[in-house]
Amino acid sequence: MDRFNALLKKELASELRTRSGIYSTLLFAVLTTTAVGFTSIERAPSPLVASALLWLVLGFASVTGLARAFIVEEDQRTSDLLRLLSPPGPVFWAKLSYNFLLVLAVAAVVVPLHLIFESVHPENWPLLIVGTISGCGALASGVTFCGSLVAKSSARGAIAGVICLPVLLPIIISGMGAISGSFESSNSDVVIGAWKSVAALAGLSLVFAGIGRQLFPFVWES
Amino acid sequence: MIYRWLLVVLSIAATAAYAFAPNARGWSTAPETARILFFHVPPAMLCSLFYLWAAIQGGVHLVKRSPESDHKSSAAVEIGTLLCALATVTGSMFAYIQWGRFWDWDPRQLDIFLQLMVYAAYFALRSSFTDPQRRAVIGAAYAIFAFVTVPFLIWIMPRLVALSKFSQHAQANNVVIGNQLDATYRIYLYSTAFVVLLVACWAYELRTRQLDLEQQTGDPIANRVSDSHPAVSNSGVVRPIRLRSDRSEADS
Amino acid sequence: MGCRENFFAAKNVGKRFGSQWVFRGVEFEIPQGECLAVTGPNGSGKSTLLRILARLEQPTEGTFSAFDRPRMGCVAPDLNLYPPLTVYEHFLFAARLRSVQANAQKLIEMVGLKGAETLPASALSTGMKTRLKLGLAVQHEPALLILDEPGSSLDAQGKAMLAEIVAEQKRRGFLILATNDHSELRFAEQELRLG
């Protein structure tokens, strides 16, 4: 636990001091939200389309921002120091937690902005908030592990997106179900279906994190 | 040896399926196209089996680090992806004839296509590593991680997605999955599925053997090297020379 | 290979990158308290051998008595520090990960970085970075210390400090040193020539 704290503190301290990662990820998310918002110039999109666009933005922002967690260690050649200092477990949990915080920060900016641009009004706030948080958890755990896979590759920057995105597609699909349900609370079937999607997202987060943690030592020491 | 007979069996089964299976009852458009079932459903069912095998062999590789398990795992992904692509293509052909569009956003169609995408990334990942040992470990880890999405896509996603209400394809799938096929169709379907399984296993075994052989005899690059770099001999031993025999000398 | 506590040994260690053997058949056995110097021209695989012994890389063939990571210290030119973290924070960070006393002030004094405690690693000169790495490598009093060309960026005062660290390590355990500097051979009891 002490190791985890030290590592998370190191992640936060190095990111907050350089700010390049956080700033570029947030800016990327805002820019894609704007571009995606063009779709609603003529008329407001349906709940399903609006939520699909939201998860598109969150998915792409995590691929560009979160996969950096391990890539940055290889780029500045600090991963060997980390390997010498710490066993793999705490490293994985610290990176995952940092990524979760980062994607939550992105969602905190992007979700309100998206609601304004698309002129959609959530009618079920708990569903929107819980759905977004569990979706962010699934994105963070999926991308953290996939990022660790590509980190050692010579083409890591180029292929990070290609490797992470397929795993994110199931998350995006479930996220669409959850968030679109929060836009139409009149239909109780839809709301129940949406909560099922939230459960699926939470399940995916746990399974991705659990399997990722089991496989990570092999990848880290390879 | 038995595989040679398989081709005969497959040809007979294929002919039988086309020639003797009756047209589907109660279909307004092109009832004869229901026969595509025999070539569409088996690959869709079997690709996940090969992905499961790839994950199992990936686990074996992580524990044992044997090249053979890596070959088995990657060959299984290759064959699984081939089946997955076949299922996608035959499925969209059928969708076009029946519903007038190649892509219907049906949960089953989507599930197979997403599996295809997840495992297509496997090849991109492997090809980005030059060191064979590392490539094998990373490939094995991804094969296991990727398989987590397969049960999700097959069993959970179709029950979640709001998409299913827009799809007409869902009914056609329920006929197969809900065991509502009539007896003739069921027999043909199971026998073609069995034949496709055997042929896929044959392809898998050939591919595994090819990879094993390439590793054992091939490795042409490695063989060339020991000739071109006589400085590094195969039998030579590099040992240190002693600079001082007495340790106290070093401290003084 | 069985790990006898009083010896650090390697047998038939070889490494191949793609098609090219860097070295093969490396064997040695060093008793506790001795230093092995690894020498050889550029590209002969000194750094690679040291990375293998530090368990940062897998050998293509061969075995050696492996130490647990917590019992090793390592300094190498490509083992980088965290650019935004300060000198002092590096010692705290490493100590918490190793579950040992940080001893930051004492170590900073020993490696001669007094006055630079609050500088981030990105603001340090190459020589100062080497000093910080040396301090980090001996913080937990490792049984095996691996030094890859430590003297190349150090000034006279730094080299004197290096000699102290070497003497202390030889009292404590094993030392492996890759070098092209003949004056550093005086630290070593055995010399392994690669290439």
Image (spheres, grey):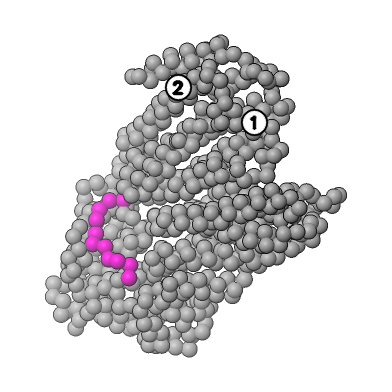
Identified at 62% across, 20% down, the residue is B34
Q: Nearer the viewer, residue A132 or C175?
A: A132
Q: Mark 2 or mark 1, which is nearer the start of the sequence?
A: 1
- Whether residue A190 is in magenta: the answer is no
Residue A133 percent across, percent down from the top left: 62, 61
Identified at 15% across, 80% down, the residue is B248
Chain letter of the residue beneath label 2 in the structure image: B
Task: Report which residue position mark 1 lands on.
Answer: B171
Q: Is residue C115 left or right of residue B171?
A: left
**Visible residue check, residue A80:** no
Q: Nearer the viewer, residue C109 or A25?
A: A25
The quadrant in which residue C186 appears is bottom left
Q: Nearer the viewer, residue B135 or B157?
A: B157
Residue C103 percent across, percent down from the top left: 38, 85
The quadrant in which residue B66 appears is top left
Q: Return the mark for residue B34.
A: none
**Visible residue check, residue C101:** yes
Task: Report which residue position mark 2 lands on.
Answer: B195
Give the answer, above or below, for where B141 lies relative to A33. Answer: above
Residue B162 percent across, percent down from the top left: 68, 44
Mark in the foreground, 1 or 2: 1
Q: Is residue B158 left or right of residue C44?
A: right
Q: Amino acid at mark 2?
A: Val
Extreme residue in the top direction: B19
| Quadrant location of the C terminus of chain A in the rendered image | bottom left
Instruction: State which region is magenta.
Output: C60-70
Chain letter of the residue beneath label 1 in the structure image: B
